[in-house]
Image (cartoon, rainbow, N blue to C red):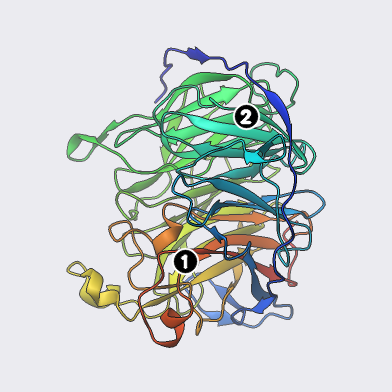
């Protein structure tokens, strides 16, 4: 189905070049050894593999920072960017942290005004994104009314800021991403910048910028708030995941829609959209982030969490219109997952980050589970990767980035209970230029939570997990 919404233009001309003065280097943090990596087939059967990676993580920032909804930007030289908040600040003041050594140490590289006050005074959803083609780093902070956007072409040393970046006000659960133009030229920046969001309780809309983020055009709705189902028309909410763009300019935007995994596909920069259901084994209805990636040959990869709380992967070799049989790809022993996110390297190579637990009560008590049933459940940050995901019987390698005896969360981990605590709506994974998969998590289970099984802290600590060695993903 295609439709062509009326275009609305929102042009923002305020753009100022600002200098950022990095804060002092944080404490050295790590590396911390993670769980043991294993090779396995879909469904969890363990197999031998001659080259298994090492799993581990680094803490992000210092005790002055807290973290929600983590995203990552990784530069071509390997520098890592991770957004956070200033602890104890009533305005949710955001920061952008930078590591030049793979996560061992961090400096504050936030956009600032005159080298002092942060140009972004508040955020409800912090978000960073690195454009791989140009090396431009984007920092966008949601305010609901719109978003505050800054971008840097010198790895956070100087920034250009736009205080009203959205294309249409009142939005939530944003995703910002870039890709080649499909229908027209750009101005001053080679890529089209897309900004998509969740309309409150209904559909998903998008805007685009043809000048690198200075001005914005509202393109249209990737998903409407009402769709037909077997029961007839019904209101369909659900969250959109992070979008991606193929080499030919095709835009892909995933979404849990009416309790199923769907994909929005646009060949004209968001003007019109095709909507495709990628599988029919359901998602966690309302609130399950889905994730999509596309490789250089146009193959599309899609991961999602089912209503059975299991992790599935599907692939498409025709641009997202037909899909493979869903494969359950979680690490062996993982009984329940949450917040899956995916990135793609060379054709056939994929990395999936997610929260997972090996002691879930879900299989025993569904559909009557109560939050209290999870009181002894512990959750870890996992990475699952493959270099032959398009094969008939692909091989996967998985590990928890943290030691399971030192979990990231304790209790229930789903939409109704507030996700995995401070992690909230989404996480992120990126494959670095050297082929290493890095994933972003939030740790709220430390100190008494680990040693005495106390309730997790309300403050989240940033965690940068990775798998080092093993097969290369780029």
Q: Can residue 117 be seen in this view?
A: yes
Give residue 13's mark: none
Q: In which quarter of the image is the C terminus?
A: bottom right
At mark 2, the secondary structure is strand
Q: In this view, does 40 lie above or below 240?
A: below
Residue identified by numbered label 1: 355
Residue identified by numbered label 2: 193
Real-space CA distance between mark 1 and mark 2, rounded to the nearest whole angstrom:
29 Å
Q: For this rendering, which residue is in front, 440 or 47?
A: 440
What crowding class fits label 2: few (fewer than 14 Cα within 10 Å), some (14-19), or many (20 or more)?
Answer: many
Residue 473 lies left or right of residue 408; in this view the side is right
Q: For this rendering, which residue is in front, 400 or 454?
A: 454
Residue 268 lies left or right of residue 136; in this view the side is left
Please report the residue visible at 72 percent of the width from the left and 17 percent of the height from the top.
Answer: 187
Please report the residue visible at 40 percent of the width from the left and 50 percent of the height from the top.
Answer: 279
Residue 341: x and y in percent read 52, 55
Residue 248: x and y in percent read 67, 30
Which of the marked residues, 1 or 2, is nearer the chain's N terminus? 2
Q: Is residue 73 above or below residue 11?
A: below
Residue 261: x and y in percent read 39, 47
Please report the residue visible at 67 percent of the width from the left and 70 percent of the height from the top.
Answer: 467
Q: Can residue 269 be seen in this view?
A: no
Residue 418: x and y in percent read 33, 58
């Amino acid at each position: 189905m295609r439709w062509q919404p009326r275009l609305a233009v929102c042009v923002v001309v305020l753009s100022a070049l600002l200098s950022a003065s990095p804060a002092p280097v944080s404490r050295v943090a790590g590396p911390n050894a993670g769980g043991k990596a294993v090779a396995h087939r879909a469904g969890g059967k363990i197999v031998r593999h001659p080259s298994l990676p090492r799993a581990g993580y680094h803490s992000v920032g210092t005790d002055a920072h807290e973290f929600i909804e983590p995203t990552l930007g990784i530069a071509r030289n390997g520098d890592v960017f991770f957004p956070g908040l200033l602890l104890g600040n009533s305005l949710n003041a955001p920061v952008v942290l930078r590591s030049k050594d793979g996560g061992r140490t961090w400096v504050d590289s936030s956009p600032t005004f005159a080298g002092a006050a942060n140009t972004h005074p508040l955020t409800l959803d912090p978000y960073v994104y690195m454009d791989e083609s140009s090396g431009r780093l984007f920092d966008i902070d949601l305010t609901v009314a719109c978003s505050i956007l800054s971008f840097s072409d010198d790895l956070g040393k100087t920034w250009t800021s736009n205080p009203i970046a959205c294309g249409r006000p009142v939005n939530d659960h944003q995703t910002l991403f870039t890709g080649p133009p499909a229908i027209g030229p750009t101005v001053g920046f080679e890529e089209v910048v897309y900004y998509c969001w969740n309309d409150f309780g209904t559909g998903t809309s998008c805007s685009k910028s043809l000048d690198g983020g200075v001005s914005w055009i509202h393109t249209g709705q990737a998903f409407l708030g009402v769709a037909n189902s077997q029961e007839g028309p019904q209101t369909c909410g659900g969250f959109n995941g992070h979008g991606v763009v193929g080499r030919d300019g095709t835009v892909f935007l995933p979404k849990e829609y009416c309790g199923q995994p769907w994909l929005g596909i646009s060949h004209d920069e968001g003007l019109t959209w095709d909507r495709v259901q990628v599988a029919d084994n359901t998602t966690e209805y309302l609130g399950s982030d889905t994730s999509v990636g596309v490789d250089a040959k146009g193959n599309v990869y899609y991961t999602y969490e089912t209503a059975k709380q299991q992790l599935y992967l599907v692939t498409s070799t025709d641009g997202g219109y037909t899909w493979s049989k869903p494969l359950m790809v979680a690490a062996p022993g993982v009984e329940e997952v949450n917040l899956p996110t995916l990135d793609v390297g060379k054709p056939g190579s994929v990395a999936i980050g997610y929260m997972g637990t090996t002691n879930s009560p879900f299989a025993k008590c569904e559909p009557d589970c109560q939050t209290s049933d999870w009181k002894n459940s512990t959750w870890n940050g996992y990475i699952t990767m493959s270099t032959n995901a398009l094969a008939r019987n692909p091989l996967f390698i998985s590990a928890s980035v943290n030691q399971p005896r030192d979990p990231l969360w304790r209790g229930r981990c789903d939409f109704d209970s507030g996700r995995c605590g401070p992690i909230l709506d989404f996480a992120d994974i990126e494959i670095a230029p050297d082929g290493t998969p890095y994933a972003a998590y939030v740790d709220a289970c430390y100190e008494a939570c680990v040693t005495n099984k106390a309730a997790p802290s309300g403050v989240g600590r940033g965690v940068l997990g990775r798998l080092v060695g093993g097969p290369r993903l780029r």
